[in-house]
């Protein structure tokens, strides 16, 4: 793309990070933006991500209020920090409204594997999970939930058309909130590399409109917390928080900031599954 004249390169996978860093050094006149990484420079290479823990918490509230078995399934790609943050935020949201809720996690070890994601979902459903959440990239879990008469929460985008009989909502990205302003700043010559972390208040991450399967009282409860999050009045990781082995990982009186959140290497109390 650079050979074809592109002057802005956006890398949208964690695995592109080191390559983009090298290219940024080789092409100082090209601007590089990297999603989900932590490397940058002070001239032509920045990174961006979002506080997906915010809508994940809200999605957890939906699941915690909708489950009848108190067993919630979570189909995840890999057991590393980004996913552990999401699982934990989701679990905290679920248990904030339903202290008996349990989140059962299964990893597929792939971002995109529709058959494996569907199989993982079916295994969770067989264990009695009646609401599924996911951090993987196909609608396989949602389709499996619909076939089993269960509920599903998606990820990345509003995918209700894939499983309208199961879809409740989804934590979603609004990349345009970052791209449009950033590219305009590049065009204007005012851009400087940064490590951007978009929030619900910024409009970069959000919760898809809840479907008609979600009762009005549940929607009202979730929207009340959403309003507080957007106002900056509801941080997600506030102590005391225990991990699923009973250890206090966030002491009472402590609130994790971005740096602290990205050091998470555990699953919180109420979540079952591996954390490494």
Image: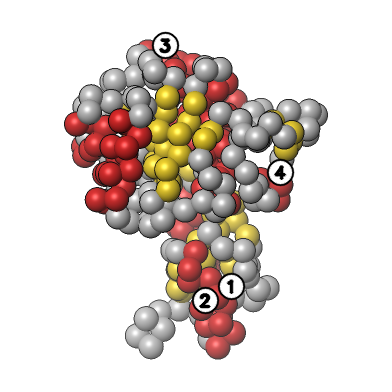
| Alpha-carbon span between mark 4 and mark 1 | 24 Å
Label at residue 73: none
Tag 4's secondary structure?
loop
Viewer-closest of 50 and 28: 50
Residue 147: which quarter of the image?
top left
Question: From the viewer's perspective, is residue 230 above or below residue 262?
Answer: above
Viewer-closest of 192 and 189: 192
How many discs mark residues in the rendered view? Answer: 4
Callouts 2 and 1 close, C-beta under 8 Å: yes
The reply to whether residue 104 is visible in this rendering is yes
Tag 1's secondary structure?
strand
Earlier sequence position, callout 3 versus callout 1? 1
Q: Position of residue 118 (x, y in %)?
A: 27, 44
Quarter of the rendering occupied by the N terminus = bottom left
Look at discs 2 and 1 and give the one toward the viewer: 2
Earlier sequence position, callout 2 versus callout 1? 2
Earlier sequence position, callout 4 versus callout 1? 1
Which residue does the numbered mark 2 point to in the structure image?
20
Farthest residue, direction top: 217
Q: Position of residue 52 (x, y in %)?
A: 52, 43
Residue 72: which quarter of the image?
top left
Callouts 3 and 1 close, C-beta under 8 Å: no
Q: Position of residue 142 (x, y in %)?
A: 28, 37
Please tell me how crowded label 4 is: few (under 14), some (14-19), or many (20+) other residues with Cα within 10 Å.
few
Which residue does the numbered mark 3 point to in the structure image?
217
Which residue does the numbered mark 1 point to in the structure image?
45
Which residue does the numbered mark 4 point to in the structure image?
257
Please tell me how crowded label 1 is: few (under 14), some (14-19), or many (20+) other residues with Cα within 10 Å.
many
| Alpha-carbon span between mark 3 and mark 2 | 47 Å
Q: How is the image coloured?
A: secondary structure
Callouts 3 and 4 close, C-beta under 8 Å: no
């Amino acid at each position: 793309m650079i050979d074809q004249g592109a002057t802005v390169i956006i890398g949208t996978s964690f695995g592109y990070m080191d390559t983009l860093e090298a290219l940024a050094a080789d092409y100082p006149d090209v601007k590089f933006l990297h999603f989900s990484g932590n490397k940058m420079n002070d001239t032509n290479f920045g990174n961006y991500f979002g506080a997906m823990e915010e809508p994940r918490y809200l999605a957890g509230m939906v699941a915690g209020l909708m489950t009848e078995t108190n067993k919630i399934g979570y189909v995840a790609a890999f057991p590393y920090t980004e996913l552990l943050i999401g699982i934990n935020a989701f679990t905290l949201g679920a248990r904030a409204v339903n202290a008996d809720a349990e989140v059962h996690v299964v990893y597929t070890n792939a971002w995109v594997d529709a058959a494996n994601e569907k199989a993982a979902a079916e295994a969770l459903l067989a264990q009695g999970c009646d609401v599924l959440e996911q951090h993987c990239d196909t609608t396989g879990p949602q389709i499996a939930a619909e076939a089993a008469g269960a509920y599903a929460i998606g990820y990345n985008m509003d995918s209700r058309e894939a499983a309208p009989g199961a879809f409740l909502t989804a934590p979603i990205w609004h990349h345009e909130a970052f791209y449009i302003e950033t590219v305009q700043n590049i065009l204007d010559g005012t851009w400087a590399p940064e490590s951007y972390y978009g929030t619900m208040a910024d409009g970069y991450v959000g919760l898809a409109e809840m479907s008609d399967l979600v009762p009005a009282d549940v929607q009202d409860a979730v929207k009340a917390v959403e309003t507080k999050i957007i106002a900056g009045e509801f941080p997600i990781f506030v102590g005391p928080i225990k991990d699923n082995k009973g250890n206090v990982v966030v002491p009472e009186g402590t609130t994790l900031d971005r740096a602290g959140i990205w050091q998470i290497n555990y699953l919180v109390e109420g979540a079952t599954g591996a954390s490494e």
